[in-house]
């Protein structure tokens, strides 16, 4: 039995660059110990890629009217087709290395229910990657030189025990909002939301949005509006890595480091409680302290 089952719903293997980075990502996962990989959906080229890489493929995933796979179906399918104690939904442009598995073991030793996530390193990757004996070290060096640590918004993986997240809404994958809800849900259920950035380097292979309708970023699409509604509104989708309540550092769970971002976020959460009686749209204009700061800067210029 493997420790972790990674599951994902890849994009079509049509665009040469998208195909390359997805192949790189899945190949990196395959090289990890104690990891199984599930590729979900029936996108073009997916079955062939699964065969080439020797990983499992399950085509029968529920989709919305636009043909976009549903997160709820992905979770249910992964749970039904695995026996590992840990599950992890992950974007198919993310390279993982051995520190990911070690961090999973460490967190599992501390608590039975949790979600582990972290910031990514953005890096341009144009070529198919090789995986020699020291490939993890080589990738890390390359990312430190050529990559950039992404801001705390947006998450590309969520690792959790299989007993967690049994009631996921019908979010559309690849659209905004569902990842924020994952953190919100953990906090509501009192599960530790753990920031693994200090212990896990994940690499995001940069790409454009040509695979989406009109080539537009996912947060501009109508399906994102549906995700926000399913999440329960703006309050839930405002959750980011700044809302984690622990950090994994050197194999131990530590308190989050103080930062201006966390301070602004704490003020925002307080204001949400104070102005709970306002309609959503109006409350959003009141509770975002960063907006006040920008407004005052304009006034006193």
Image (cartoon, grey):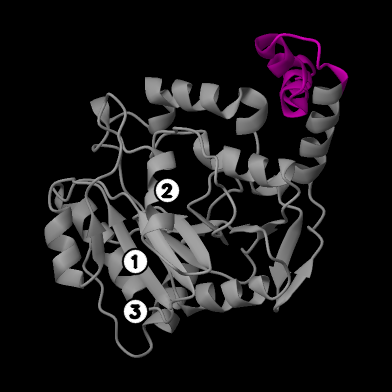
Going from N to C along the chain, the mark reached first, 1 or 3, is: 3
Question: CB under 8 Å between callouts 1 and 2?
Answer: no
Q: Which residues are magenta?
A: 274-301
Relative height, residue 194 to residue 249 (above, below):
above
**Percent x, y for residue 138?**
40, 81
Q: Look at the numbered disc 2 and give the secondary structure of its residue.
A: helix
Q: Which residue is mark 1?
A: 37
Q: Which residue is mark 2?
A: 76
**Percent x, y for residue 8?**
35, 53
Q: Look at the numbered disc 1 and give the secondary structure of its residue.
A: strand
Going from N to C along the chain, the mark reached first, 1 or 2, is: 1
Relative height, residue 164 to residue 220 (above, below):
below
Q: Which residue is mark 3?
A: 31
Q: Look at the numbered disc 3 and give the secondary structure of its residue.
A: loop
Whether residue 146 appears in this view of the structure is no
Q: Residue at x 48, y 59 (%)?
A: 88
* Other residues around mark 3 within 10 Å, as few (<14) / some (14–19) / many (≥20): some
Q: Residue at x 28, y 57 (%)?
A: 39
**Between 221 and 167, which is closer to the camera in this rendering?**
167
The residues bearing labels 1 and 3 have C-alpha atoms spaced at a distance of 11 Å
- Give the foreground label among 3 and 2: 2
């Amino acid at each position: 039995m493997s420790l972790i089952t990674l599951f994902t719903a890849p994009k079509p293997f049509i665009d040469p660059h998208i195909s390359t980075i997805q192949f790189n990502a899945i190949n990196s996962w395959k090289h990890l110990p104690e990891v199984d990989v599930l590729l979900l959906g029936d996108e073009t080229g997916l079955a062939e890629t699964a065969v080439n890489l020797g990983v499992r493929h399950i085509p029968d995933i529920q989709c919305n009217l636009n043909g976009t796979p549903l997160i709820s179906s992905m979770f249910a399918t992964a749970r039904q087709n695995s026996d590992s104690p840990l599950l992890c939904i992950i974007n198919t442009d993310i390279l993982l290395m051995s520190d990911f598995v070690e961090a999973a073991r460490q967190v599992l030793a501390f608590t039975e229910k949790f979600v582990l996530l972290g910031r990514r390193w953005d890096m341009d990757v144009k070529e198919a990657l090789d995986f020699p004996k020291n490939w993890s070290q080589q990738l890390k060096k390359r990312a430190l030189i050529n990559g950039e640590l992404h801001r705390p918004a947006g998450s590309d993986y969520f690792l959790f025990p299989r007993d967690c997240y049994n009631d996921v809404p019908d979010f559309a994958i690849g659209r905004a909002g569902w990842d924020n809800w994952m953190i919100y849900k953990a906090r509501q259920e009192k599960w530790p939301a753990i920031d693994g950035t200090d212990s896990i380097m994940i690499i995001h292979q940069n790409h454009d949005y040509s695979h989406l309708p009109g080539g537009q970023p996912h947060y501009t699409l109508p399906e994102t509006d549906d995700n926000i509604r399913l999440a329960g509104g703006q309050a839930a989708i405002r959750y980011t890595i700044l809302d984690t309540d622990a950090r994994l550092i050197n194999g131990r769970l530590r308190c989050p480091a103080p930062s201006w971002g966390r301070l602004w976020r704490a003020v925002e959460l307080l204001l949400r409680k104070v102005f709970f009686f306002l309609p959503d749209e109006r409350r959003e204009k009141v509770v975002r302290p960063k907006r006040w700061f920008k407004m005052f800067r304009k006034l006193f210029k």
